[in-house]
Amino acid sequence: MQITEKFIELISHDNTLNKTQAKILDLPFPPESNWKEEVLNKEILKNDANRLMLLKGKLAIKAQEQILKNYLTVLEFNNIKSKDIEKKPETTSQDVNDDEEHIRIYCDGACSGNPGLAGSGLAIYSNKSKPVLLHGDFVERGTNNIAELNALYQALIIAKQTSSENIITILSDSKYSIDCITTWAYGWKAKGWTKKGGEIKNLELIKKTHELYERIKDLIEIKHVKGHAGIEGNELADRMAVTAIKEKTKNYEMYSYEKKEEVLSLTSY
């Protein structure tokens, strides 16, 4: 479902959120003053919406935890599967069930100078197979945000072209690019692609990426991962983005390698 102003009123208390609500919405705690703008029009799961409403109020941490446990009990009693909001270690190709196809696309951007030379990279996992690495979208005078958006756009293209019975997961360490495409774009589009306070930077790139996201959003999920935190897929995509800069790769090319350790040992910015 999509978060509306009415829904924000239903979940907020004293114009703010408690710690668990912030966690569900992937917001810092305490939430920043513009948290409502950040979550408005964002797509969330129905179960998360239910949790957010049940958690409304100034509650002690133990009370918040108990509400989540009670809600999980209700779901289990009714044989309803639920996404656990508790933070878990980032999945890798070794965590995937071989019997089920599961595709994950890590995307990342890099920039030397900001503005400066920019490039994008991807690491594509399918079950336990060796990840496919791609580098491209070299821009002579780009920014880190442009590189991140280019990487996300390419990930969406690949997801659209991939046939899978299961949801395809796209993972990026750029909250900017994720929020632009999955949240802020709805408000900007409703206002004729304008916003208060000035121009929308990278507008044409945002528009085409959001359009593609809208076409396939029911087939994918986009997740934020922490950058430079040792998450293999993210690190591999980062090295590919740097490779795109070094090799000035404009069209995406596949990177040939024997061992992942060889790629991870490459220089990162």
Image (cartoon, rainbow, N blue to C red):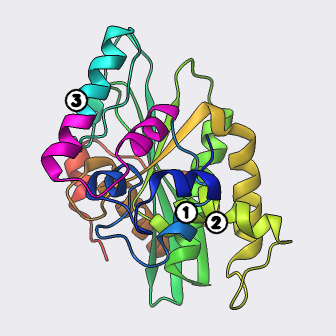
Q: Position of residue 228 (x, y in %)?
A: 25, 65
Question: Mark 3 and mark 2 in contact (Cβ < 8 Å)?
Answer: no
Q: Residues within 10 Å of mark 1 (few under 14, many from 20)?
A: some
Find disc 1 in the rendering and name its residue: 179
Q: Viewed as shown, does residue 85 lie left or right of 10?
A: left
Q: Is residue 56 above or below residue 193?
A: above
Asked if the stretch drawn in magenta spans residue 83, the answer is no
Q: Which residues are magenta?
A: 46-67
Q: Is residue 72 above or below residue 45?
A: above
Q: Residue at x 17, y 53 (%)?
A: 60
Residue 71, by quadrant, is top left
Question: Mark 1 and mark 2 in contact (Cβ < 8 Å)?
Answer: yes
Q: Position of residue 262 (x, y in %)?
A: 23, 53
Find disc 2 in the rendering and name its residue: 184
Circle 1: element type: helix
Q: Residues within 10 Å of mark 3 (few under 14, many from 20)?
A: few
The label number, if any, that marks residue 243 in the structure image? none
Q: Viewed as shown, does residue 12 lie left or right of 260?
A: right
Could you tell which of marks 3 and 1 lies nearer the N-terminus? 3
Find disc 3 in the rendering and name its residue: 69
Residue 136, by quadrant, is bottom right
